[in-house]
Image (tube, rainbow, N blue to C red):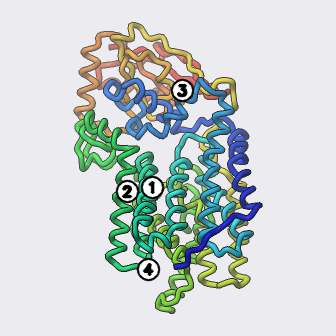
């Protein structure tokens, strides 16, 4: 294997410096983050962790109450200490660091004499709907994608050392696996990319025994990384609920407070082999097939067509003298396995970000395999640029507000004797971001949320309501309160409570310059 080295051209270095700054400025331009997940759990979960509310509240942020809060801690702690615009710029710039590693991966996978094309391919990768949609938000996908990219760069840039074996190979595999594991522990949806990187080691031009040894070392390192970022949380969930992934996979662990189901979001799952095989086209035809917001990522259709043509050529050539370098073959295997894992397990578009950033590079590798250095390869490169421009011109917006002097301002509720009161988070709209402003003495229970609760859950809530003789309050989103007939009133009747609109009051709750408000109702026992 050729032990190549790369040096970035001066303008590539300039792009790597300017990229994070540009994305920081773009984050400022888009405004204060106000996405659904932030309002539901990105602020509540770190608050609950720091104040020990895991054993006090139940589903205050719905089933998302039990997602790992570690990724949200820095953002939560920064609020109140730094200006909102500074936080927004830093967040966007940090997400923009992905460009540096996309550029490095591109330059290692592509030949040295294609530096101008490499810049275009790297820039095209940054224009995907998942990355631009999450830029400057608290969704966390770009942060963990950065870790996946760093891991992939380590593997691809040092693939020759890995193939050579020895202590250096072990160090590289351990570091790369550990970094990939950190990403998977922070957001478990990154697991397919760790598996893809692991399986792709089978493409190394070494003996079968050494391949298995590499896979074992990398896999153990991945598990160590997951343990570093998730083990503490999994142990806490297991102690409280009997399920380290509560409420997910409760069909396996049978935690008593949730129904014994997988708790996966089935809206996006593939429906059979043909649905999976046609998905790169389906997601373009139906913009909401894999996302709540309409996206039509053309790059996947182009990549799929090129992959089919490449497979046909490979079969005709019996995969002999494929023309792919060892790095290109490793990258291709990683990409295909990761895509298959994502599609088979999640099929939710935001979670595909780590390989979406590298999708234009995949198209170039396949085009180079098919057409060599001909004009057709340059045509595919130009097509990647066109797809990138179309994607950048239609950035999806998960929710922003105007900048204000404070990121969040919530009018505290009037809770009578909070030490004996109970608060019910009523309905499925995201309201948990306001709970840090509530009295900590009162427990908060989710009722009629997206958590599939068990009879034991309802019994626990009923027992607390009986033991705490104080007032009972319900928190509602204004959109749910304004529904004709107030259907959520039926949700509290099973607890012997009555919800009357005349006993409700509106309070202010600002995200940036936007007043979302909330409704607090005192329930009658």
Q: Which residue occupies 38% across, 49% down?
A: 226
Contact? badges 2 and 1 (CB < 8 Å): yes
- Residue 180 is labelled as 1
Above or below, 504 against 16 in this view is: above
Q: CA distance from mark 2 to mark 4?
A: 22 Å
Comparing labels 2 and 1, the label whose residue is closer to the camera: 2
Tag 3: Cα neighbours inside 10 Å, few (<14), some, or many (≥20)?
some
Q: CA distance from mark 3 to mark 1?
A: 41 Å
Label 2 element class: helix
Residue holding disc 3: 478
Q: Which one is nearer the viewer's eye here, 191 or 438?
A: 191
Q: Position of residue 374 (x, y in %)?
A: 71, 85
Q: CA distance from mark 2 to mark 1?
A: 9 Å
Tag 1: Cα neighbours inside 10 Å, few (<14), some, or many (≥20)?
many
Contact? badges 2 and 4 (CB < 8 Å): no
- Residue 205 is labelled as 4
Q: Position of residue 352 (x, y in %)?
A: 52, 57
Q: Is residue 30 left or right of residue 348?
A: right
């Amino acid at each position: 294997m050729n032990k190549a080295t790369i040096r970035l051209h001066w303008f590539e270095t300039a792009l790597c410096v300017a990229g994070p700054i540009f994305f920081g400025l773009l984050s400022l331009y888009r405004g204060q983050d106000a996405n659904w997940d932030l309002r539901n759990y990105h602020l509540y979960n770190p608050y609950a962790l720091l104040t020990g509310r895991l054993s006090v509240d139940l589903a205050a942020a719905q089933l998302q109450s039990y997602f790992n809060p570690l990724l949200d801690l820095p953002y939560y702690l920064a609020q109140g200490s730094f200006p909102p615009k500074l936080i927004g710029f830093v967040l966007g710039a940090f997400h923009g660091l992905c460009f540096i590693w996309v550029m490095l991966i591109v330059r290692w996978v592509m030949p040295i004499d294609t530096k101008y094309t490499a810049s275009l391919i790297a820039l095209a990768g940054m224009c995907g709907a998942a990355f631009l949609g999450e830029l400057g938000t608290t969704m966390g996908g770009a942060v963990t994608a950065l870790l996946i990219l760093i891991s992939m760069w380590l593997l691809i840039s040092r693939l020759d050392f890995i193939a050579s074996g020895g202590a250096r190979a072990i160090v590289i595999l351990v570091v790369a696996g550990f970094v990939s594991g950190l990403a998977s522990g922070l957001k478990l949806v990154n697991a397919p990319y760790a598996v893809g990187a692991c399986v792709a080691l089978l493409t190394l031009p070494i003996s079968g025994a050494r391949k298995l040894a590499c896979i074992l070392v990398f896999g153990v390192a991945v598990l160590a990384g997951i343990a570093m970022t998730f083990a503490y949380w999994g142990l806490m969930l297991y102690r409280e609920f009997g399920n380290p992934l509560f409420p997910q996979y409760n069909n396996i662990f049978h935690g008593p407070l949730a129904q014994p189901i997988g708790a996966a979001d089935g809206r996006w799952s593939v429906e059979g082999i043909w649905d999976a095989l046609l998905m790169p086209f389906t997601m373009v035809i139906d913009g909401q097939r894999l996302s709540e917001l309409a996206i039509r990522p053309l790059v996947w259709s182009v990549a799929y067509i090129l992959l089919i043509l490449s497979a046909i050529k490979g079969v005709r050539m019996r995969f002999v003298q494929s023309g792919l370098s060892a790095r290109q073959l490793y990258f291709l295997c990683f990409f295909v396995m990761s895509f298959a894992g994502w599609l088979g397990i999640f099929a939710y578009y935001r979670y595909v970000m780590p390989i979406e950033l590298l999708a234009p590079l995949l198209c170039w590798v396949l085009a180079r395999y098919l057409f060599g250095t001909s004009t057709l390869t340059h045509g595919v490169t130009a097509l990647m640029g066109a797809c990138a421009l179309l994607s950048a011109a239609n950035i999806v917006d998960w929710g922003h507000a105007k900048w204000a002097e404070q990121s969040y301002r919530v009018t505290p509720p009037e809770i009578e004797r909070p030490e004996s009161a109970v608060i019910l988070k009523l309905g499925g709209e995201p309201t948990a971001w306001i709970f840090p402003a509530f009295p900590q003495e009162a427990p908060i229970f989710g009722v009629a949320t997206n958590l599939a609760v068990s009879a034991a859950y309802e019994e626990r809530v009923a027992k607390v309501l009986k033991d705490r003789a104080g007032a009972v309050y319900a928190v509602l989103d204004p959109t749910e309160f304004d529904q004709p007939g107030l259907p959520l009133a039926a949700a509290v009747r099973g607890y012997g409570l009555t919800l009357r609109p005349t006993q409700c009051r509106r309070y202010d709750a600002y995200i940036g310059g936007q007043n979302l408000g909330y409704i607090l109702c005192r329930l009658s026992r």
